[in-house]
Image (cartoon, helix red, strand yellow):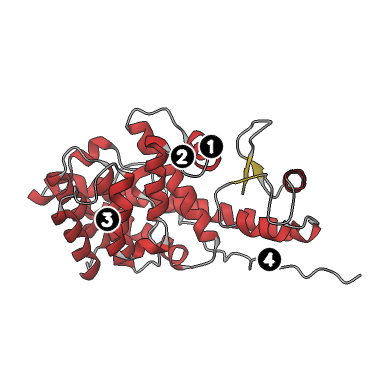
């Protein structure tokens, strides 16, 4: 009998880890030092953010989940990453994802390639944050758009300006400025899609100081640079961990015999989580056996800790 041809993704590229000196504990002494560390960390992240391997989709989704969980905590909500993931993947089509789910939706949209077009920002931001399409101040949307067309010597400065301007016009809105900051930064750095970074590492207290940036104060700029430096190092670590896991998954893939095995491997490398359910040509039972086999091979993890309604991912 002829061997079935396997259709598997290419192995993900590997990148150098972040330099150890970027993992500093003490805050920078001056804004100049903060800008330097942010620039160095973003430069180390740049090759990963520029690459378009499908693992980048999963990587951005995991970062979006971290951002959404951080924002939920700051907003006094109880959902952690596990709860947000559960509700996202186990809800029925058409169900309202709820307040936490809408935040996750916004940050997942942030990491999509379509978001590289600033004309799509209003459609991504407004509904997810509970705004009508015409309720966001037009000057904020236009300012963000102008920052995509003007090169800054320091890309983080463009992010600082959009956050500060948003904070002045929308003093009670903590989500839109953070979303636009990452979108503007990606444009400045010519990334094919934004990378969700800032929301998981900038506190609400710091965000409230943003309008001072327009008056020449440096406190917010220093804190913003520190947050971006930490976020970039965290993102590099996450990518390298996912690349290692994806490489192992591809190494054991030839041992899999399920009808949807290759498709499952491909999805696992581009999607945060996957339920064991009926596939394109496999039953629920067959899918469960496939995932159990992958877990036994150390290629995937069960992400919920439950005996039922399980989710699997790298």
- The residue labelled by disc 4 is 8
Q: CA distance from mark 3 to mark 4?
A: 36 Å
Which mark identifies residue 86?
1
In the visual, does 205 lie left or right of 102? left
Callout 1: helix, strand or loop?
Answer: helix
- The residue labelled by disc 3 is 122
State the residue lying farthest toward the front. Answer: 94
The residue that appears at 23% across and 48% down in the rendered structure is: 222
Q: CA distance from mark 1 to mark 4?
A: 27 Å
Would you call the spot at circle 1 few (<14 residues within 10 Å), some (14-19), or many (20 or more)? some
Callout 4: helix, strand or loop?
Answer: loop
Residue 224, x across and y down, in percent? 26, 48
Q: Which mark is first along the chain, 4 or 1?
A: 4
Q: CA distance from mark 3 to mark 2?
A: 22 Å
Callout 3: helix, strand or loop?
Answer: helix
Q: Which mark is first along the chain, 2 or 3?
A: 2
Residue 207, x across and y down, in percent? 23, 41
The residue that appears at 27% across and 54% down in the rendered structure is: 180
Relative to residue 168, is residue 116 depicted above or below?
Answer: below
Q: CA distance from mark 1 to mark 3?
A: 27 Å
Nearest the camera: 34 or 289? 289
Nearest the camera: 119 or 26? 119
Nearest the camera: 277 or 177? 277
Q: Which mark is first along the chain, 4 or 2?
A: 4
Callout 2: helix, strand or loop?
Answer: loop
State the residue lying farthest toward the left. Answer: 215
Q: Are marks 3 and 2 in contact (CB under 8 Å)?
A: no
């Amino acid at each position: 009998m002829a061997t079935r041809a396997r259709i598997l993704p290419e192995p993900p590229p590997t990148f150098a880890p972040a330099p150890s000196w970027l993992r500093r504990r003490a805050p920078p002494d001056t804004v100049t030092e903060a800008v330097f560390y942010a620039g160095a960390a973003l430069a180390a992240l740049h090759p990963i953010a520029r690459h378009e391997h499908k693992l980048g989709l999963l990587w951005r989704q995991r970062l979006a989940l971290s951002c959404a969980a951080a924002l939920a905590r700051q907003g006094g909500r109880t959902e952690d990453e596990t709860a947000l993931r559960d509700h996202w993947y186990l809800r029925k089509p058409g169900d309202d994802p709820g307040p936490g789910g809408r935040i996750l939706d916004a940050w997942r949209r942030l990491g999509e390639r379509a978001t590289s077009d600033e004309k799509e920002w209003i459609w991504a931001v407004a509904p997810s944050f509970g705004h009508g399409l015409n309720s966001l101040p037009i000057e904020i949307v236009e300012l963000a758009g102008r920052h995509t067309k003007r090169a800054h010597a320091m890309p983080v400065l463009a992010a600082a300006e959009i956050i500060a301007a948003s904070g002045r016009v929308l003093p009670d809105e903590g989500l839109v400025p953070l979303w636009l900051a990452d979108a503007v930064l990606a444009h400045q750095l010519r990334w094919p899609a934004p990378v969700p970074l800032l929301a998981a590492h900038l506190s609400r207290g710091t965000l409230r100081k943003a309008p001072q940036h327009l008056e020449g104060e440096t406190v917010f700029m220093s804190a913003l640079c520190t947050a971006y430096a930490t976020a970039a190092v965290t993102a590099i670590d996450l990518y390298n961990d996912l690349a290692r896991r994806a490489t192992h998954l591809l190494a054991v893939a030839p041992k899999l015999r399920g009808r949807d095995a290759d498709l499952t491997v491909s999805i696992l490398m581009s999607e945060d989580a996957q339920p064991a359910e009926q596939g394109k040509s496999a039953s629920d039972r067959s899918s469960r056996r496939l995932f159990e086999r992958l877990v036994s091979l150390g290629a995937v993890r069960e992400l919920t800790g439950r005996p039922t309604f399980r989710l699997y991912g790298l």
